Image (tube, rainbow, N blue to C red):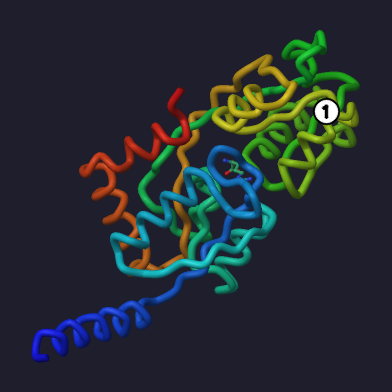
Amino acid sequence: MKKSFIVFLIVTLTFFTLSLATTYIVGTSADFPPFEYVQNGKYVGFDIDLINEIAKIEGFKIQIRDMSFDSLIPALRAGVIDIAIAGMTITDEREKIVDFSEPYWHADQDVIVKKDSKFTVTVLCGKHKVGVQTGTTGDLWVSDNLVKPGLLNPNNVKRYQSFIYSLQALLNGSVDANVLDSPVAERFAKIKPVKIVATLVTGESYGIAVKKGNAELLNKINDALKKLESSGKMTLLIDKYFGK
Ligand code: ARG
């Protein structure tokens, strides 16, 4: 009798504590395999697992909200989301308006073209059309390094809200190339009829973003990242999404 009452008490208390756990809204742009994408109607990927592991360690709940990449920072600033995890590069400009966790990934930019095309890196110049995702570092690279020096006509940069559309435009011939993060280009080259013709060494690092000044949440995220590294869980996650 007594024992079952104690069990009852523990179960009730656990439920009570769990239901008290804060829920953070996590924004992502689920068009970026293997970091975040939709599979069988579910949000999956390295970033999604990572934020779930962080939530487990720090005892909070999460709710994923999918949006266009360029809405993530405005959504953080407006308090519509609490966390942004989207293979987001830590840049000086972004650091002025949001706070980033410690880096958890490194990437460059790649140029991809259709697998059966004869294009080389010169696809980035002249009359060719180049597709990018709006507001990404790929978009910025194209503007700074191709459009500004006059190598590419500004009208030939095609911006898409989602990488899915940018890739579709490449596959149906509306654009000749896409500029996008190297790990994602490598994944697309495995699963779609596209190939990488150049790597632009940009030396980017990905971080998880929170609203500027939200030190409490940022500390939790950084603490969990450290624990995931030291427990070996991070390596397991990397193997899951990047292993052969
Ligand atoms: N790393 C690039 C950036 O921060 C691209 C990120 C795009 N992410 C995505 N989930 N679509 O600008």
- Residue 198 falls left or right of residue 88: right
Q: Nearer the viewer, residue 128 or 174?
A: 174
Three-letter residue code for mark 1:
Leu
Residue ID at (22%, 44%): 231
Residue at the disc numbered 1: 171
Q: Position of residue 168 (x, y in %)?
A: 81, 35
Where residue 237 appears, as percent x and y from the top left, is 38, 40
Residue 182 in sight here: yes
Instruction: Using the image as rendered, state which of residue 55 and residue 136 is in the foreground.
Output: 55
In this view, the residue farthest toward the front is 1
Please tell me which residue is depicted at 60% across the width and 63% down the height of the picture: 65
Where 231 sits versus 4, above or below?
above
Quarter of the rendering occupied by the N terminus: bottom left
State the image quarter where residue 27 is shown: bottom right
Whether residue 88 can be seen here: no
Residue at position x 47%, y 43% in the image: 46
At 55% from the left edge and 38% from the top edge, which residue is drawn? Answer: 34
Q: Which residue occupies the extreme top position in the image?
A: 118
Q: Position of residue 208 (x, y in %)?
A: 45, 53
The relative height of residue 210 versus residue 157 in the rendered view (above or below) is: below
- Total number of numbered discs in the rendering: 1
Which image quadrant shows ligand 1? top right
Give the answer, above or below, for where 139 lies relative to 198: below
Q: Is disc 1 placed on a helix, strand or loop? A: helix
Whether ligand 1 has any atom under 8 Å from the Cβ at mark 1 is answered as no
Residue 222's x, y, as percent?
31, 54
Is residue 55 rendered to the left or right of residue 164? left
Q: Residues within 10 Å of mark 1 (few under 14, many from 20)?
A: some
